[in-house]
Image (cartoon, grey):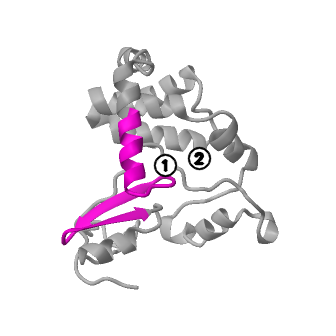
Amino acid sequence: MRAEGKMSAGHRDSGLVKLLAPPTGLGQAGRAPGLKVLCRYQNIWNINLQLRPSLIGGIMKDSGSLSAMRFLTAVSLEHPEMLEKVSRELWMRVWSRDEDITQPQSILAAAEKAGMSAEQAQGLLEKISTPKVKNQLKETTEAACRYGAFGLPITVAHVDGQTHMIFGSDRMELLAFLLGEKWMGPVPPAVNARL
């Protein structure tokens, strides 16, 4: 399905982006079904994907990412201009470089690499157990659930009086269609292309 027009809405990650579902069964060539689907997009997205079952299980089941999500919530509350950079760095740590995001020193390293001062990052880390941060994350999660979210990332589009919840980072063409815009891909062919 192709949409016509120009894409003017950008995609922003609102927190940790998790692209892969937990491996419920292995498909052909030992790949998890979710990864097989994502591999179709490697050339379009200009990325290299590799299956790391121990990493996936550790992130999604054993170790959890609650501290990182709370940290991002604190960033959103106090330094919203840093949210995208810190989110991206945490994503890169876990999905691109196979690094931890669950331990305090890992979260601090990600925040500093994203451009936060050590003092800012430490101050935010100290707030992840406060009622304000916990309640905000709970409210955000509940709001996502009201839209029907069952994983991340989701995009909620309000178009012509209707609400559309779109799951997955590979659904931008669908979002463009809903907006009546043309999707030029995640890596547009021209430098000045509007997405």
What number is the disc on residue 124?
Answer: none
Q: Is residue 181 left or right of residue 30?
A: left
Q: Tell me the magenta residue range.
A: 137-166
When the figure is inspected, residue 2 is found, relative to residue 70, above or below; the finding is below
Circle 1 — which element? loop
Give percent across and percent down for residue 70: 44, 29
Q: Amino acid at mark 2?
A: Trp
N-term mark: 1 or 2: 1
Give percent across and percent down for residue 74: 36, 27
At x 75%, y 44%, the residue is 54
Q: Is there a contact, CB below 8 Å, between mark 1 and mark 2?
A: yes
Does residue 115 appear in this view?
no
Q: Nearer the viewer, residue 66 or 81?
A: 66
Report the quarter where the N terminus lies: bottom left
Q: Which residue is mark 1?
A: 17
Q: Which residue is mark 2?
A: 95
Number of residues whose C-alpha sits closer than 10 Å to that of mark 2, classed few (under 14), some (14–19) or many (20 or more): many
When the figure is inspected, residue 157 is found, relative to residue 90, above or below; the finding is below
